[in-house]
Image: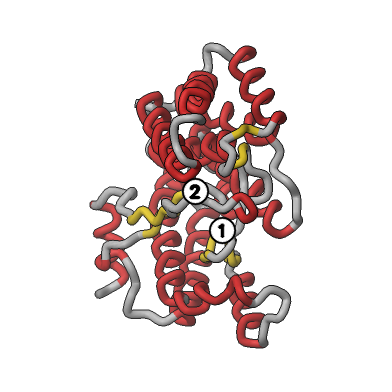
Amino acid sequence: MSKNFIYIGLLVASVFVSCNKEKTSVPNDSNLDTITEILYSSDPDYVLSNKNAQELVEHLESEQKDLKRKLKKANKKEAEALFIDYYKRLTVIVDSINMAETNTLKTYHKLGNEKHDTILRKENTYDKVGLYFRKIDSTTYDFKIKPGYFYNLFHKKITREYEEYLKLRYAEHKLLYDAQFNNEKITLEQQRNLIISWEKFIVKNKDFKFIDYAKKSYTDAIMMYLFGTSTKPAFEVSNKKLYVENEQEYITFVKKNPKLISAEITKSFLKHFYANDKNFTAEVFYLDLKDFTKKEISERLK
């Protein structure tokens, strides 16, 4: 299938054609995996499945160069169109790399500091085109564009809505990136500030082209806020008890911000938590709480 046909199909189709790869198992208290959902392009018409990893890397590098060249002469309207077009283009290529590198990604978590030359060369190759091995959970990795790529490229060249959107995406991605590579803990304050910023953006820009992506980012952020991260969970699953720091954070947040949607979701989360912590086994409790919270978020964002 030709490259042009793939991209024409992308422009006609919804940007949100994806496959939801979500872990539904209950995390172990001693190794709590990050609660997240990863979206990949899955329709074969939109995936460069006939190319190997090296060809895809070369294709990605070529597209990145084309984007920079076109952006130099673009006005704000044209730059906006370039972002919409090339965000889809580059995302499809990265998703295709993830598929082409399935075997590498499946075993990457086992390597630790003992990486053989082949892996080190791959890390270097992908680093040159702005990709890195992203840790999704304790055993799962994928390739991701480094934080700030689009924001730095389009900064001051697009409209306010796009500028704010890309800045927020940069901020959320950098938190996770720094946690993985710089061993920086993501604090409750950072998480709180992020969900408030996303909420304000969503409320203010309801007709934004990428509003569904913004809602997805908001959902991920508030789920992390309420359930915790891999290194710092919000509660012990086994005894169904919130950590004191988290409990006080949520109560204070609700009291200080009664008009925020995020505060309403947090209040509902706490109410459901306390109403069911004695009624279910740890496994059922966790899955029920997660399902309830996601439904609550979805309803509030309508």
Name which residue type carries label 1. Asp
Residue name at image x 49 percent, y 60 percent: 67
The image shows residue 147 at horizontal and vertical percentages of: 61, 53
Foreground residue among 56 and 80: 56
Residue corresponding to mark 1: 137
The image shows residue 299 at horizontal and vertical percentages of: 35, 26
Quarter residue 289 falls in: top left
> Is 183 situated above or below 266?
below
Few, some or many residues within 10 Å of mark 2 (<14, 14–19, 20+): some
Foreground residue among 88 and 154: 88
Q: Which quadrant of the rendered structure holds the C terminus?
A: top left
Task: Check the image and tell me how it is coloured.
Answer: secondary structure
- CA–CA distance in space, label 2 to label 1: 9 Å
Name which residue type carries label 2. Thr
Quarter residue 196 falls in: top right
Label disc, if present, on residue 213 of the rendered structure: none
Q: Badges 2 and 1: C-beta atoms under 8 Å apart?
A: yes
Residue name at image x 52 percent, y 38 percent: 223
Few, some or many residues within 10 Å of mark 1 (<14, 14–19, 20+): some
Report whether 258 appears left or right of 178. left
Quarter residue 109 falls in: bottom right
Callout 1: helix, strand or loop?
Answer: strand
Foreground residue among 25 and 23: 25
Residue name at image x 46 percent, y 67 percent: 63
Query: Is residue 156 something one can see in this rendering?
Result: no
Foreground residue among 59 and 108: 108
Q: Earlier in the sequence, mark 2 or mark 1?
A: 2
The image shows residue 69 at horizontal and vertical percentages of: 52, 61
Residue name at image x 48 percent, y 70 percent: 60
Residue corresponding to mark 2: 36
Q: Which quadrant of the rendered structure holds the N terminus?
A: bottom left
